[in-house]
Amino acid sequence: KAVSLAEHLFNNKFQDLSKKDIEDLELLYDLMCFVTPDKDLKLQKLIEVIEQKIENPFNAGNKKVLIFSAFADTTNYLYEQLAERMKAKYGINTARIQGAQHGNTANIQGVKDTDRLLTLFSPISKERDTTYPEDKDVNIDLLIATDCVSEGQNLQDCDICINYDIHWNPVRIVQRFGRIDRIGSKNESIQLVNFWPNMELDEYTLKNIETEVKASVIIKGFNPIEYSEEFTPTKYVPR
């Protein structure tokens, strides 16, 4: 079959570009391999926030922490890095919820369906002792979840919500916080913690999202703790 000059040039150019893409991706992968968990500054800051909260609860005896991420892979990573550590250091149980049951897990015995895990995380608001009487002595204190639980869930036993990443829709951030900022909460104070990326390409978008998120939570009478790429708090006003 005859091949035109244009097709020949396109095929050669395409092959050259594909080769360049492969080389770039291999370089990127090699660079990413250097970012091990102990060198992951964002993860280390998250651990610091969690451990400070557990060791110095702002509501007596409340060790519960709710962490949101928009990405299932990120929740996998956080569960791998946090569950065993928190169990060994503080004796608390951790759960990961991704919606479909095959994406759920926890370091407790029994089924890992979403309703049970959420009930064990917020046993008062979800009436654990009535719904799951066999689990009346089982608690989950650290919950890592995707946005599958950002709506319609009463998780007000918890008093801190951490956004490990910021969803492009500012309403989703408010919805996440709304899981713990609910009528019937036994907590005297609650906290919202945001981790903001520092990316030039998204600067305009992020600026607008940040403005809308802050405006939304200020209307509710609460200003969140904010962390930028440098992971230093920029603003916190108690409720």
Image: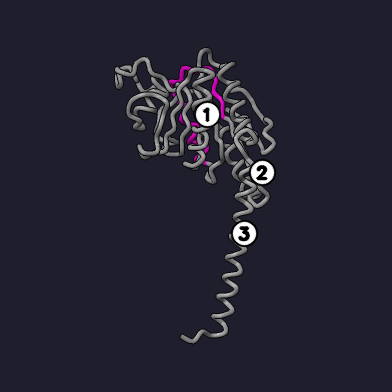
> Is residue 31 or residue 156 the one in the foreground?
31
Q: CA distance from mark 1 to mark 3?
A: 34 Å
Image-quadrant location for residue 233: top right
Q: Is residue 179 left or right of residue 221?
A: left
**Image spot of residue 146 (x, y percent):** 46, 38
> Is residue 213 or residue 104 the one in the foreground?
104
Kind of residue at badge 2: Asn
**Image spot of residue 80 (x, y percent):** 50, 33
The residue under label 1 is: 82
Q: In terms of sequence position, does the residue under pointer 3 or pointer 2 come before the other?
A: 3
Tell me what residue is drawn at x 53 percent, y 15 percent: 59
Mark seen at residue 198: 2
Kind of residue at badge 3: Glu
| 227 falls in the magenta region | no
Tell me what residue is drawn at x 48 percent, y 20 percent: 92
Mark seen at residue 23: 3
> Is residue 106 or residue 219 the one in the foreground?
106
Estimate how packed mark 1 is, as few (under 14), some (14 to 19) or many (20 or more) residues with alpha carbons within 10 Å: some
**Image spot of residue 78 (x, y percent):** 52, 34
User: Which tag is nearer the camera, tag 2 or tag 1?
Assistant: 1
Secondary structure of the residue carrying numbered label 3: helix
**Image spot of residue 19 (x, y percent):** 59, 64
Q: In terms of sequence position, does the residue under pointer 2 or pointer 1 come before the other?
A: 1
Q: Tell me where the magenta segment starts and ends, as one range.
A: 171-192
The image shows residue 214, relative to residue 83, as above or below, that is below
For the residues bearing labels 3 and 2, Cβ distance under 8 angstroms: no
User: Which tag is nearer the camera, tag 3 or tag 2?
Assistant: 3
